[in-house]
Amino acid sequence: MRSKLLLFLILLNNLLLAQKEVVEILGANELRPGRTNDHQKLVGNVILKFDDTKLFCDSAEVNGKTHDFNAWGQVFINQNNTTKAWGDSLIYDGLKKIGKLIGDVKMKSEKSLLKTNTLFFDKENNIVYYINGANTKQDESQIFSKKGFYNTKTKYLKLSDSVRIKNPEYTIKSDTLEYSTNSKTSYFLGPTNIQLKEEKVYCEAGFYNQTLEIGQFEQNAILQKDQQSLSADSIYFNKSKNISEAFYNVVLVDYKEHLKVSGEKSYFDRENNFSYITENVLFAQGSEDDTLYLVCDTLLLREDEQNKKSFFAYRNVKLFQAEMQGKCDSLAYNFSDSLIKLFDDPIIWNGESQLTGDSIDILNYDNKIQKLFIKNNGFIVSITDSTPNRFDQIKGRDLIGHFKKGKLNMIDVLGNGQTIYFAKEDDGKFTGVNKAICSNIKIKFNNGKIDRIKFLSMPEATFYPLFDFPESESILKGFNWRPEERPSSLKNLLMKSDL
């Protein structure tokens, strides 16, 4: 008789509460009076239903007027068999549809499992959140944060404060992060460090998609791999294709080669060891004391199968080093043999000398120019003194320049040699002008000026007294003095108007 009465009371209670569509009592071993006339206490194998959710617990107390309830002991919540939660106790506001699960709390949703000590949920907005720290397992990822908000409908997770994500493929440490469990995409909303298998990333905004292995990193973005680092306002990264692109304030540093390249746009294909940087390109290699600087419109870098690196500079190329400056329209540099090749109207300045030819090769190592090769139409011009239009000149088919401590020390003229040389006494006074033609010539320099000339075969030479030297003879064919094009300083090299 007692069991029939309890069943009747439960059915009557369900009828009253169902009209308000808040809480249904599906089962309990005992029904007792609550703390007020509006409360009912349920004891033993309690089952409640609110909206699309069922709750199982040891005991509960339901307010039939406000539709609030408390649950204790082995609390289990099941929402449409999609989201499940466990805890020691539960406080639920029926009108606001807001609950608080307390104790050894677990929540499982599809492939994710969350553990914490206190979990809040808002059924009206499909949100579950915590503020005291939680560990979440999502597929192969272990996730921790002090605060987190999870939308059970969109499967969207927002984490903040000491965020950590550990995955076999990557590790993420972030200030604030949002994560879509559907697309497996992380969105970064604060300072973030990402450790991939081979790369490291820092950014303060952006995203990374685990499935597609693509990411966009922004705000002080830095991508590091091996002994290289890439920084920019924005970096796009495709791990599966092993390519990346960077935009605005791009800086590439190669610590092994002691070089730094900056520009505005760049593309890096690590699969094929190919990359390029464009717009306001500045290349720098060497130490602080003696660095080779280069500017150009576009810089292309390659690495062959033997890991030998080289780069190619195109359009408006200019060089600056303490002892050497240069200019051309295109340039190639091989790191393995330290050879710089200048093409398309190349010109080099060293000390008081200007060197030109159809092409110029520079052997440059230990941050110093060691040797120089001028092929076809080699021409060297040096200022003799402050007297206008007074130049020492050397001309030949090919020229080889030898340098000592970065300064021009000797020139070998190979074929079709011609010279105009203002000779001096030991006291520095000019004695006259020697104009000669000789197939092969060796010329010694001192402080960037001609010091001695040695003709290696019988020359055709004429020596003129200084003031009897005809002006019509003072210039060799092909002479072109271009001091206004010479970069006078690093600042001058970087001036846009000078490019």
Image (tube, rainbow, N blue to C red):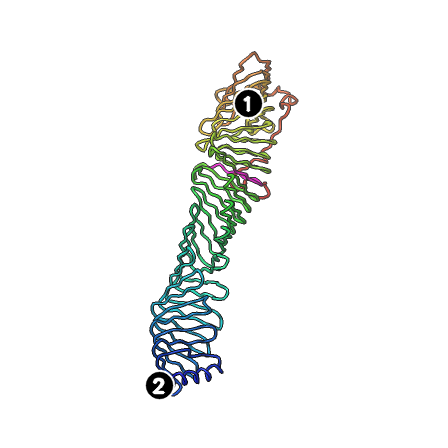
State which quadrant residue 112 falls in.
bottom left
In this rendering, position of residue 319 left or right of residue 111 = right
| Quadrant in which the C terminus is drawn | top right
- Which residue sits furthest right? 472
Q: Residue 105: horizontal and vertical position, in percent?
A: 36, 67
Q: What's the residue type where badge 2 is placed?
A: Arg
Q: Residue at x 44, y 44 (%)?
A: 225
Mark 2 or 1: in front is: 2
In the rendered image of this protein, does residue 381 appear above or below residue 181?
A: above
State which quadrant residue 226 falls in.
top left
- Which residue sits furthest bottom? 37
State the SS at label 1: strand
In the rendered image of this protein, does residue 251 appear above or below residue 401?
A: below
Instruction: Name the main secondary structure of what is drawn in magenta.
Output: strand
| Quadrant in which the N terminus is drawn | bottom left
Q: What's the residue type where badge 1 is placed?
A: Leu
Question: Along the polypeptide, which appears first: circle 2 or circle 1?
Answer: 2
Q: Nearer the viewer, residue 214 or 56?
A: 56
In the rendered image of this protein, does residue 10 appear above or below residue 184?
A: below
> What's the distance in space between the residues labelled 2 and 1, CA to CA?
117 Å
State which quadrant residue 160 falls in.
bottom left
Magenta extent: 291-301
Q: Which residue is mark 1?
A: 399
Q: How many marks?
A: 2
In the rendered image of this protein, does residue 254 appear above or below residue 174?
A: above
Residue 169 lies in the magenta stretch: no
Q: Residue 491: horizontal and vertical position, in percent?
A: 52, 42
Q: Residue 417: horizontal and vertical position, in percent?
A: 58, 18
Are there few (<14), some (14-19), or many (20+) residues within 10 Å of tag 2?
few
In this rendering, position of residue 170 left or right of residue 385 = left
Are there few (<14), some (14-19), or many (20+) residues within 10 Å of tag 1?
many
Q: Which residue is mark 2?
A: 2
